[in-house]
């Protein structure tokens, strides 16, 4: 009997070890753990405005300075795609009980593979939307349109279609909003304004974020 107990105890510990190893192998695991470490030291206030998504938010380190009248919590991470945000929703969205969740993601989804269509990105966003709406029913859910990065010029038509599909979906839902940064970042020629981007032609400089500030501020929840 004792040998049987020892055997099952070993299997259980092995199971836990495998689960932990799989979790650590998940994309951006270390970044999420860093957020949790920050939270253990100083947990963000409830009813704040939460930014979540990919590197356009992650690199906006001084975002609070752009919106001094609001409490901003920035949880953008890595070069994340929507499945990553979905994976970590219970870690970096739900616990904060924000009054508004602003999502910037989908850009990297389209760039990850030629097989990723606007329909797939929209379906992924809907999945995230329903997770957040189910657990934070009073929070405003806001989507920031995919931006027109010069390095991704070939994806422009997919970006436009994805933005349009997500906007159409949000219009069917209560307590939502959509922030259009795509058009303010474009030239009449159909190309993005080059001087608002860093040398990688993907991420933005201060001029780019100034455009985002102007587009976002009217949609922030008081």
Image (tube, helix red, strand yellow):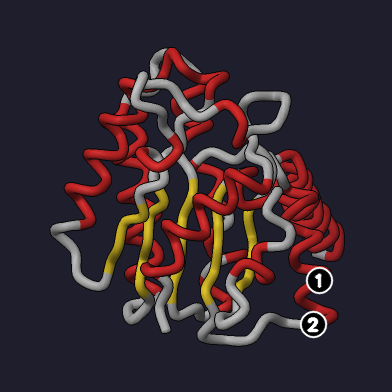
> What kind of element bears circle 1?
helix
Disc number at residue 38?
Answer: 1
Q: Quarter-wise, where is residue 3 in the image?
A: bottom right
Quick one: 133 or 221, which is closer to the camera?
A: 221
Q: Quadrant of the N terminus?
A: bottom right
The quadrant where residue 129 appears: bottom left
Query: Which residue is depicted at the point 62% across and 78% down?
Result: 68
Indicate left or right for 80 with 5 as reference.
Answer: left
**Viewport quadrant of the C terminus:** bottom left
In this view of the protein, which residue sits in the foreground, 172 or 5? Answer: 172
Which residue is drawn at the image coordinates 64% and 35% (left, top)?
Answer: 203
Q: Position of residue 107 (x, y in %)?
A: 48, 34
Q: Residue 70: x and y, percent?
A: 56, 80
Indicate which disc residue 42 carries. 2
Position of 6 relative to 161 (above/below) = below
| Callout 2 secondary element | loop
The residue drawn where x is 39% and y is 16% is 115
| Residue 27 x/y as whole percent | 68, 39
Q: Are marks 1 and 2 in contact (CB under 8 Å)?
A: yes
Q: Is residue 181 left or right of residue 166?
A: right
Whether 143 is drawn above or below 112: the answer is: below
């Amino acid at each position: 009997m004792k040998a049987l107990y020892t055997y099952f105890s070993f299997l259980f510990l092995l199971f836990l070890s495998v689960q932990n190893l799989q979790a650590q192998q998940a994309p951006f695991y270390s970044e999420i753990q860093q957020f949790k470490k920050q939270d253990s030291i100083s947990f963000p206030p409830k009813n704040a405005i939460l930014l979540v998504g990919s590197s356009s938010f992650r690199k906006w380190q001084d975002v609070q300075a752009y919106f001094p009248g609001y409490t901003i919590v920035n949880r953008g991470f890595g070069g994340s795609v929507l499945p990553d945000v979905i994976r970590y929703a219970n870690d970096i969205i739900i616990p904060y009980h924000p009054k508004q969740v602003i999502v910037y993601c989908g850009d990297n989804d389209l760039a990850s593979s030629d097989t990723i269509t606007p329909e797939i990105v929209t379906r992924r966003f809907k999945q995230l939307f329903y997770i957040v709406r189910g657990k934070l029913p009073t929070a405003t859910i806001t989507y920031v349109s995919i931006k027109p990065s010069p390095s991704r010029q070939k994806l422009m038509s997919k970006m436009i279609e994805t933005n349009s599909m997500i906007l159409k979906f949000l219009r069917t839902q209560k307590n939502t909003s959509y922030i259009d940064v795509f058009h303010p970042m474009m030239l009449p020629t159909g190309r993005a304004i080059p001087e608002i981007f860093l040398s990688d032609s993907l991420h933005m400089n201060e001029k780019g974020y100034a455009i985002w500030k102007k587009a976002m501020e009217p949609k922030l929840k008081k």
